[in-house]
Amino acid sequence: MAFNEPDEVDNIMALDGQLICIFGGGGFLGRYIAQQLLSRGARVRIAERDPKNAMHIKPLGNLGQTQFASADVTNADSVAHAVQGCTAVINLVGLLKGDFDVVHVEGARNVAKAAAAAKCQALVQMSAIGADPQSPSHYGRTKGEAEDAVRAAFPRAIIMRPSIIFGREDQFINRFAAMIQMLPIIPVIGAETKFQPVFVGDVAQAVAIALDDPDAFASETFSLGGPEVITMEELNRRIAELTKRERGFVPVPDFAAKILATCTGFLPGAPITLDQFKMLQKDNIVTEGQAGLDRFGIKPTPLASVARGWMDKYRVQGRFGARAKAG
């Protein structure tokens, strides 16, 4: 039986009335996870440093179904306060630039310890493909260390390792689409690096299903990827195709990309940091033999099947030009 059928009453009602705290719930992925949980009858408590940044979550639920808490994962006391009375906790907090050790490792440890102390039934730690304490990149290393810290404090934790997550509000596909919209020639860093982009709705559904029956998924690690393995250059070409723009693509040699990352990566708005360059030296795809979306009965969503819904704005004359051509 597929879990993504809307009439799965037993699964939808499994979370009815439960209070689930989502650290970083106001972000891109948090919005979709909150929506999945709210549709299943759960109550959600969105924990953010500034709860005002998460107010867009409130209309997704019914009256009294959504709560907000001011919490910083680097502050253990605020984390402990946020999880009080919760049956489950989700940690989505992460960054691509900044103090990885404090946010990724200490932050995750604080969340796991608080969840254990509050006797929560389940904890979902959002990690990433490539998480490894031995990773050459600071991001990958601290994501791996975070998993170890969470396991030590909350052994039944469910670890989710998605590849690049795409969706209407993402900062990945949209970033490349905007660049393709502006430039006639597109420099591609890490052109041969492989990705397995996964739809944000699929990741959110996997989290909700895991919390529907935490005993069935406890202590497991899942690699979440989409139906396609695609290189960075192929991904850019696919985006250009979706936005109906003819562009030239020039792979940037690794030595040049490394120089660029070393000399400018520390600047605000830099195209790539040195740590991101190191991450691009390894493919970002699902580990063979590791459990993934299939474990949750989810059929991965292809990029093309959903991206057209928000790619129109990057076309010539936007969505109105697309409609005129279609007519």
Image (cartoon, rainbow, N blue to C red):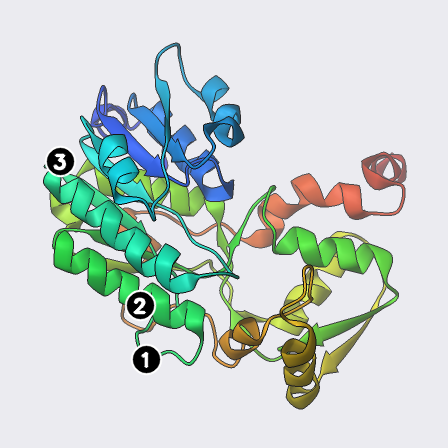
Q: Is residue 117 left or right of residue 303?
A: left
| Residue type highlighted by circle 2 | Gly
Q: Is residue 282 visible?
A: yes
Compare marks 2 and 1 and give the one earlier in the sequence.
Answer: 1
The residues bearing labels 3 and 1 have C-alpha atoms spaced at a distance of 32 Å
Count residues near mark 3 (Cα–Cα under 10 Å), then give few for <14, some for 14-19, many for 20+: some
Judging by the rendered image, the residue that carries numbered circle 2 is: 144
Q: Categorize mark 2 by other alpha carbons within 10 Å: few (<14), some (14-19), many (20+).
A: many
Relative vertical location of residue 55 with respect to residue 27 in this rendering, above or below = above
The residue to which callout 3 is attached is 118
**In the foreground, 227 or 222:** 222
Among numbered discs 3 and 1, the one appearing first in the sequence: 3
For the residue carrying disc 1, how many other residues have a C-alpha within 10 Å: few (<14), some (14-19), or many (20+)? few
Q: Pick the quarter of the image with the C terminus.
A: top right
* Quadrant of the image occupied by residue 289: bottom left
- In space, the residues marked 2 and 1 are separated at their CA atoms by 8 Å
- Element on which disc 2 rests: helix
What number is the disc on residue 134?
1
Labelled pair 2, 3 in contact (Cβ < 8 Å): no
Rounded to the nearest whole Å, what is the CA distance between mark 2 and mark 3? 25 Å
> Given the current orientation, which residue lies at the most extreme bottom position?
255
The percent coordinates of residue 262 (x first, y second) are: 63, 80
Pointer 2 and pointer 1: residues touching (CB < 8 Å)?
A: yes
Question: Which amino acid is tagged 1?
Answer: Gln
Q: Which amino acid is tagged 3? A: Ala
